[in-house]
Image (cartoon, rainbow, N blue to C red):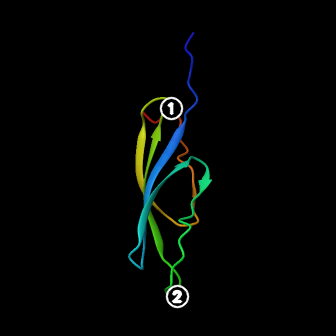
Amino acid sequence: MTTTQEPKVSWYAQWSCSCGDAGDTHVDDGTTVDADHDCDQDAGPEIGWDGRAECGACGWSLETQFADGDYVDADHDCATDQ
């Protein structure tokens, strides 16, 4: 009998703002990202993210970009994503 581990996906991400500020963070799969950044630009900040998702159960990984306020979900399945 084969036992299947449930995926444990973590995100490691760096954000950058159009004003020049930047930072990094760690979030769990299924999180709405927020840089929590106050920006003095009149039009408001434009924040982009470079993220890497990693599965602790099987070692799968994904690199992608997303925007502030996005819901990040890798939609990963250990059996099919290898």
Up the image or down, 24 lies above or below 37; here it is above
Residue 36 quadrant: bottom right
Residue 32: percent from left, percent from top: 61, 58
> In percent of the image, x 51 and y 43: which residue is there?
10
Query: Are the residues tagged 2 and 1 within 8 Å (C-beta)?
Result: no
Q: Is residue 53 left or right of residue 28?
A: left
Q: CA distance from mark 2 to mark 1?
A: 42 Å
Q: Which residue is mark 2?
A: 43
Q: Which mark is residue 78?
A: 1
> In percent of the image, x 55 and y 33: which residue is there?
7
Which of these two is toward me, 63 or 77?
63
Which numbered disc, 2 or 1, marks the residue that appears first in the sequence?
2
Front: mark 2 or 1: 2
> In percent of the image, x 52 and y 90: which residue is there?
42
Residue 15 visible here: no
Up the image or down, 48 lies above or below 82; here it is below
- Secondary structure at numbered mark 2: loop
The disc labelled 2 sits on which kind of residue? Answer: Ala
